[in-house]
Amino acid sequence: MQNIWKYIVSEKVNKIWGIKMGLSIMFFAIILIWKPFNLTFQQAVIVANTILVIIWWSTGIINKIPASLFLLVIFYIFSGASIKMILSFSLSETFLMIIVTYLFSQGIANSGLIEKILQPLLIKLVHTPCQCLIAIVGIFYLTMYIIPQPLARLIIVSSVLFHFLQQINLPERTKKVLMYGVFVASAVVNMSTKDADIIMSNIAANFSEMPISNRTWAYYMFIPTLITCCLLGILFIYIFHKALIGIPLKNVEKENKISPFSAQQKLAIGIIIMTVLLWTTNGIHGINNTLITIISTIILFAIKILHKEDWKSIDITTLIFLTAAFSIGNIIKFCGAADKVFGQLQAIFPTKFSLLYIYVMILTTMLLHMILGSNTTTLSVVIPGLMILCSQVVKSPIIVFISVISVSFHAILPFHSISLMIGVSNNYYPAKYITKLGLPVTLLVYLVVIGIYIPYWNIVGLL
């Protein structure tokens, strides 16, 4: 029984845990009894349980798997939706692609190819902290398709940089700032193309009323995101200038060289290159990218780059969490609660598309992000809601893009991003860095949307 309880509860059950649980249930009870926005009993049950589980996700009162399964069961019992609708994400090709890319990315990590190539290049080319930041951004762009799973890519790149910094005589604060730069750069670069973040971007795109392919996403997002990356880099250097400016990188081990590749590694390189080429030329040959990745992963197993223990690299917790998070928008909309809840926000939106209209969209998304925490959860709630409110005024791809921009690299606390929580938990940097950068980034998000993305979308015909 004790083991089962540990599976359900992530922290020690004490007075503080009891207070947290009591407050979460209080919110649940208030919504269920009060029935705000003229909700029916059925709708109140759905909304109350959704908020209850979101609180559990955000605070860690209950572990993600039992919390997510609880929400899915509630949806099945009370929403009247079919299992197919509730589990639509798990039944989608995106879900299968995520599973396969966990394995494919693990294969790349096992081969050691990234570390084998990047470590010597960093030692040879990087001589200042600012050059290191530029190199980090470059690495993320270069590995965008080589390592398709965003979290795996982030973990590999952060590990490479961490080991690189251990070889250098730098102040500890500078090392921590540079490590924080890795996680910030990842968040921005991942907005460049749909496949750069196979989880968040695909989930967001699936809510669009108009199909958004990877090519379409890149056409509208790549260039303005690259400019945004440069501006954020300038802001980052300004805020942390004491740890970055005028500090040379000394005592680098120059003797590090690229050792010869084994036959197994050469074969793995060939498979990876061929896979990436097939991904990028999908429009020519028409072969499904998921099928390509499955075949490549099977070959990596066959040549012993991947082993049976690597099946553990598939993050079951994240997959179940994503299934529940993705279902929220569909179910709230299906039962009619979304129309009533988001309909109340209609009054704060201008009647016509304007800069003020965009400001309100960004503000709505940011406020929900501050409350809900997780990027994925926020997008699963806010995009369906904005589709109800704004689809008659704004094209659905614009709603998706603005929502993604508003949450991707904007965070005040670690719980606003899973990747940032990983960085803090690994002691790469302190949590206060997130707040220090996050507050001015709030203003930057507004400025880049109005000053970069909107003008660019006007030029290319999206607006």
Image (spheres, rainbow, N blue to C red):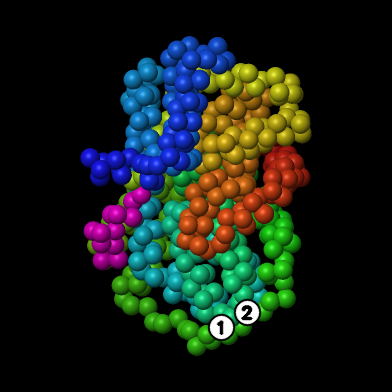
* Drawn side of residue 8 relative to residue 18, left or right: left
Residue name at image x 72 percent, y 71 percent:
245
Q: Is residue 138 above or below residue 126?
A: above
Does 55 sit left or right of 191 as displayed?
A: left
User: Does the rendering let one see residue 236?
Assistant: yes
Q: Are marks 2 and 1 in contact (CB under 8 Å)?
A: yes
Amino acid at the residue labelled 1: Val
**Where residue 286 sits in the image (x, y, percent)?**
42, 46
Q: Is residue 384 positioned above or below 142 on the image?
A: above
Name the quadrant containing residue 141: bottom right
Q: Is residue 116 left or right of residue 433?
A: left
323 in magenta: no
Residue 354 lies, in percent from the top left, at 76, 30
* Magenta stretch encompasses residue 305: yes
Would you name the residue on which mark 1 appears?
252
Magenta residues (range): 304-315
Say which element carries label 1: loop
Dot 2 corresponds to which residue? 249
- The type of residue carrying mark 2 is Leu
The residue positioned 70% from the left and 19% from the top of the image is: 347
Distance from label 2 to label 1 (Cα)?
7 Å
Would residue 357 appear left or right of 194 to someone viewing this image?
A: right
Instruction: Report crowding for label 1: few under 14, some 14 to 19, many 20 or more residues within 10 A (C-alpha).
Output: some
Q: Is residue 191 above or below residue 135?
A: above
Q: Nearer the viewer, residue 373 or 119?
A: 373
